[in-house]
Image (spheres, rainbow, N blue to C red):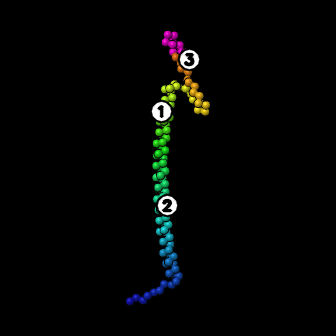
Amino acid sequence: MAEEIKFTDEELKSLSELSQGYQNIQSAFGQLRVQKILLEQQKDGLEEAEVKMEADYAENQQKERDLVKELNDKYGPGQLDPASGVFTPTPQVEVDENEGSAEES
């Protein structure tokens, strides 16, 4: 049988430090992976929020088009001063068929 060799305290300390270093690195890898998962979840949440905001924006645009059409049908073309709420109709130009001249009404 082979003779046993006992490592020195310094050699045992070096081996222990290496082992501890690997444990620390493995733990750090685990922490990084968890952080990546959390970031992916945040990214997914942001992308979902962005899609919803795009849909809300398109819906608001459609509401604007519907309101503009409704107001144009009711009041005709013109300009609205949002601060005062005063609507100024655009003058309509009519052509007199008998004379071929344009008149403002």
Amino acid type assigned to the residue bearing label 2 in the image: Gln
Which of discs 2 and 1 lies nearer the camera? The answer is 1
Residue 40 painted magenta? no
> Which of disc 1 and disc 3 is earlier in sequence?
1
99 vs 49: above or below? above
- Residue found at the very far top of the displayed protein: 98
Whole-percent x and y of residue 55? 46, 42
| Disc number for residue 104 | 3
Q: Are marks 3 and 1 in contact (CB under 8 Å)?
A: no
| Disc number for residue 3 | none
Amino acid type assigned to the residue bearing label 1 in the image: Asp
Q: Which residue is mark 2?
A: 35
How many C-alpha atoms fall within 10 Å of the one at disc 3: few (<14), some, or many (≥20)? few
Q: Which residue is mark 1?
A: 66
Indicate the secondary structure of the residue bearing disc 2: helix
> Which of disc 3 and disc 2 is earlier in sequence?
2
39 vs 19: above or below? above
- Which residue shows up at 50% across the image and 32% down it? 67
Whole-percent x and y of residue 38? 48, 58
Which of discs 3 and 1 lies nearer the camera? The answer is 1
Q: CA distance from mark 3 to mark 1?
A: 29 Å
Quadrant of the snapshot with the C terminus: top right
Q: Main secondary structure of the magenta part?
A: loop
How many C-alpha atoms fall within 10 Å of the one at disc 2: few (<14), some, or many (≥20)? few
Amino acid type assigned to the residue bearing label 3 in the image: Glu
Q: Which residues are magenta?
A: 95-105
- Which residue shows up at 53% across the image and 13% down it? 101
How many C-alpha atoms fall within 10 Å of the one at disc 1: few (<14), some, or many (≥20)? few
